[in-house]
Image (tube, helix red, strand yellow):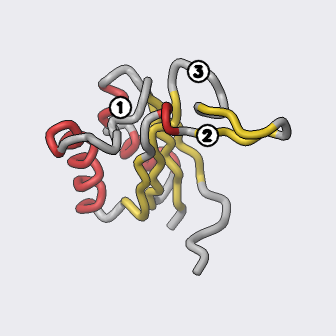
Amino acid sequence: MPQYAVLIYTDDSAHALSASEDELAEPNGHGQELAASGALRVAYAFTPRALARSIRATGVTDGPFVDAAEVVAGVYVLEAPDLESALEIAATNPAIRDGGGVEVRRVHSGGVIR
């Protein structure tokens, strides 16, 4: 079955190193729902933008690579029969209700390297 990457864009990640269970209840609950559905294959929540470091030819700088209102707060991979199904699943992401959004892209190749 095809896999689709879902990139989560928000004003910042909710997953601060000091985040409480209450603060993470909504995003973690969403992940648990996707896992229970059988569609979720892998998920990663990123820490806030203040902890990002970017590398360019000129060296390392503090912050995300692109200075934008939204940053990539996390990414997960779904299995779905087609793009329309993947979009339907991704549309349930709580980031959308909170003013952010998600980007859905079919995964071409790759996987876990051991």
* Residue position for label 3: 68
* Amino acid type at mark 1: Ala
Q: CA distance from mark 3 to mark 2?
A: 15 Å
User: Is 112 on the left or on the right of 10, as rendered?
Assistant: right
Q: Residue at x 47, y 56 (%)?
A: 77
**Would residue 100 appear left or right of 107 to someone viewing this image?**
left
Among the two numbered marks 3 and 2 on one chain, the one whose residue lies closer to the N terminus: 2
Q: Position of residue 37 (x, y in %)?
A: 27, 60
Nearer mark to the viewer, of 2 and 1: 2
Name the spot of residue 40 as percent of width and height, x first: 37, 60
Q: Secondary structure at mark 3?
A: loop
Q: Amino acid at mark 3?
A: Ala
- The image shows residue 36 at horizontal and vertical percentages of 23, 62
Judge whether 85 appears above or below 58 on screen: below
Quarter of the rendering containing residue 2: bottom right
Quickly name the residue at label 1: 95
